[in-house]
Amino acid sequence: MIDSRVAAERLENIESEEEIHRAIGKVLGLLEVGRDLAEITSVVMKPNICWGEDWKTGGTLCPQLLRAFVRYLRDHDVDEIVLAEGTMVGTKTFEVLTKLGFMDMARELDLKVVDLNEDDMVEVEVPNHHVFDKIEVAKTVVESEYFINMPIMKTHINTLVTLSMKNLKGTIPQKWKKRLHYMGLDGGIADLASAVTPDLILIDGLVGQEGMGPLTGTPAYAKVLMASRDPLAIDVVASRAMGFESSEIKHLSMYASSHNIDLASFGPEVVGVPMSELDLDFERPHFALEGAYEGVEILWGDPCSGCAGALSVALERMERAGELDKIRKEGGMTVALGKDANPEDMARLILMGKCQHKNRKKGIYIPGCPPPGMIVRDIILKLTDAESRYGGDAFIKEAEGLYEDEPE
Ligand code: SF4
């Protein structure tokens, strides 16, 4: 039976490699991870380094944590350590790792680096699936002797939180990352978590992200590390510590139902810092859309946080970049989202998400459930005849034929 304990430790000085090394030793000691490591010679670690922003934004793994963790693994005689990541759609893994100094660190610490986006892939069956009965996963992860998942503690505009289950998106190729966005992100994450089970999870809560995470939120200096062998247990404990109910997080509910677990009564044991002292109070993502942007009319058809969050981020970035000014000058726009929006025929209409597939012929259609914010921005810019910069055209093309079973 899986060990569902979750270990937690708070830190004072998150800049100190010594302090981080001590905290790693504490949480992993509480779980007796040293006994696991005595049996193995190689590990694959999958951090969250999904794009090229500095760790103090809360968007990227703390480099001192990686350094201190490698030291801990060497202390336990682990010979081969693989740093494995597959960055987000529209980015290149080695470019991101180089920009943030992780390639230099890997050379210095003698780590092998694998780009999981470009790895050989293995088709993995998903038991009790919601969306996908099989998923392609990077061979380096599937065939690893000991797989360590290292997410960051962040809010997420689409899924409320991104923790261990969501971080697994980095283990699948970019075409599959997009497929999750086309067919249902929450169900896709739950299926992926059922297909790929880490041996150990270490959450970086030194600097997380709150509000409009995971990329444009505010740094949250939570100064905490958490570890577990159980993905559901650590995601439930971490999200509760952040201030959210597990039942609010759809992919956790879906994963629990696949595994016949009653989420309402699921209370993993917390060791180390007690739950009562893990009151981290992360700010929620907020979606103030209606009336918030001059020249942008929103037809709000009861969308879920997926499309609401993606549109919110897209509009904010467009405002900051001056792109909405151009759209205003040319006559503004209307955006319909959610299953209950039924727009009339009109000019300059954007139809967003799988829920609006039924109206797609009335305007510019953005596929996805939800579409990524960057893709939303790219496709909206078609109103200004701008060229596709973030892969919007390819995203539309690859979606063709996927929703044939959706209502017309
Ligand atoms: S398409 Fe519909 S269900 Fe899917 S994320 Fe958008 S609003 Fe939610």
Image: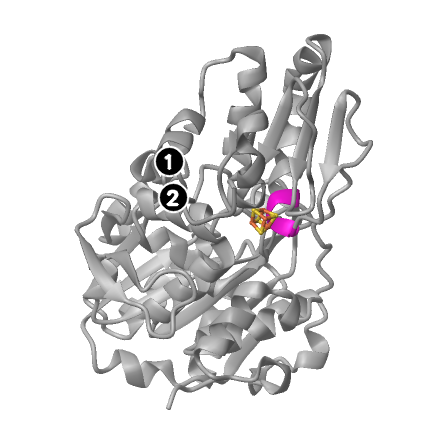
Q: Could you tell whether 58 is left or right of 398 in the image?
A: right
Q: Nearer the viewer, residue 8 or 74?
A: 8
Q: Is residue 305 magenta?
A: yes
The residue closer to the viewer here, 28 or 308, is: 308
Label pair 1/2, CB-CB below 8 angstroms: yes
Q: Is residue 28 left or right of residue 354?
A: left
Amino acid, disc 2: Leu
Rendered location of residue 290, percent (x, y) = 79, 36
Splitting the image into 4 quarters, where does residue 258 fall? bottom left
Q: Main secondary structure of the magenta part?
A: helix
- Distance of label 1 from label 2 (alpha carbons): 6 Å
Does residue 266 sit above or below 215 in this rendering? below
| Residue 196 in sight | no
Is 254 drawn above or below residue 170 in the view shown? below
Quadrant into which the N terminus falls = bottom left
**Image point 51% across, 25% down: which residue?**
378
- Regarding residue 142, the answer to whether it shows in the image is yes
In the rendered structure, which amino acid carries the disc numbered 1? Answer: Glu
Identify the residue at the far right of this view: 291
**The magenta segment:** 304-308
Residue under label 1: 400
Q: Which mark is residue 289?
A: none
Q: Secondary structure at mark 1?
A: loop
- Which of the two residues, 122 or 140, is positioned nearer the viewer here? 122
- Whole-percent x and y of residue 155? 62, 54
Q: Position of residue 10 (x, y in %)?
A: 61, 70
Residue under circle 2? 402
Q: From what the image shows, is residue 309 above or below residue 98?
A: below
Q: Is residue 217 magenta?
A: no
